[in-house]
Image: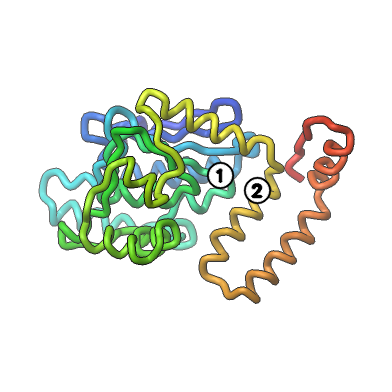
Amino acid sequence: MARTDVLYEKKDQIGIITLNRPEKMNAMTHEMLALFLEITEQIRKDDDVRAVILTGKGKCFCAGTDLSGDVPEAVETELNYLKSKDTTIYSYNAWFFASIPKPVICALNGPAVGAGSEYPLHCDIRIAGKSAKWGEVFVRRGLIPDTGAGTYLLPHIVGFSKAAELCMSGEVIDAEEMLRIGLVHEVVPDDELMPAAMKLASKFLKAAPLAVKMTKQLLYMGLQRTIDHHSEATRYCFQLATKTEDMMEGINSFLEKRDPVWKNR
């Protein structure tokens, strides 16, 4: 496995994950999926990482799954890989970044199609460079959105009708259309994409880590719960939050007019 196909670095408490196969338009392999799992697990355990950015190297975010060579054999290899993974780890609907208990931003640096269109949906917030394009092109290959994000998360992001149009047509849209329908948070010049992503990620460093973790869990769990169940979960998490040292620090720092020093406990 080429461990350099996915890069990971930390900068100012921000973890940066970079797809690094620019010569192949960052097309995904099952080895890269294994690196995703490894990196996301590392991020979960690292309290020093407070926010995460996902992006691609070069002029393309991700051209989808690498099916070069014998296509049926490549698809079978991919399916066998997924079946082999521990279901308690992988089967979080393969939503790697939604399962990270920290804010995750996708910085779309170019075309994102096929599997490459699914990964941005796993992230909490998306911003795009002006050259970015995005498309759930699966139906044009006789397939369906492979991680389920297009058919589940996308309707919550852009609305059911627009998600249905995009998923069932396989249309590829540009950055301005992504912004218009609410798929991305912001569109910036390509050379300003990472500075904009870092600026956005820095906003989350002011928040209490445990409170952010519980808030993200409630956001995603709220997609599948009834109002009553969600209210119950919210009350439970709120009570937990009131018992943390960070809650007291948040109140004291406000009263003392200073920046809080979070202890993540």
x and y percentages locating residue 143 in the rendered image: 21, 62
Secondary structure found at label 1: loop
Q: Secondary structure at mark 2?
A: helix
Considering depth in this image, is 251 or 58 the residue closer to the camera? 251
Q: Nearer the viewer, residue 82 or 49?
A: 49
Taking the spot 58% from the left edge, 49% from the top edge, the residue there is 101
The correct choice, above or below, for 46 with respect to 242 in the image is above
Residue at the image point whose x is 52% and y is 45% from the top: 41
Disc 1 marks a residue whose amino acid type is Pro
Q: Residue at x 30, y 59 (%)?
A: 146
Can residue 28 be spotted in the picture? no
Amino acid at dot 2: Val
**Which quarter of the figure is the N terminus placed in?**
top left
Instruction: Give the side of residue 99 with respect to residue 184, left or right.
Output: right
Q: Are marks 2 and 1 in contact (CB under 8 Å)?
A: yes
x, y percent for residue 36: 41, 44
Outermost residue, front direction?
180
Residue 19: image tag: none
User: On the image, numbered disc 2 is attached to which residue?
Assistant: 212
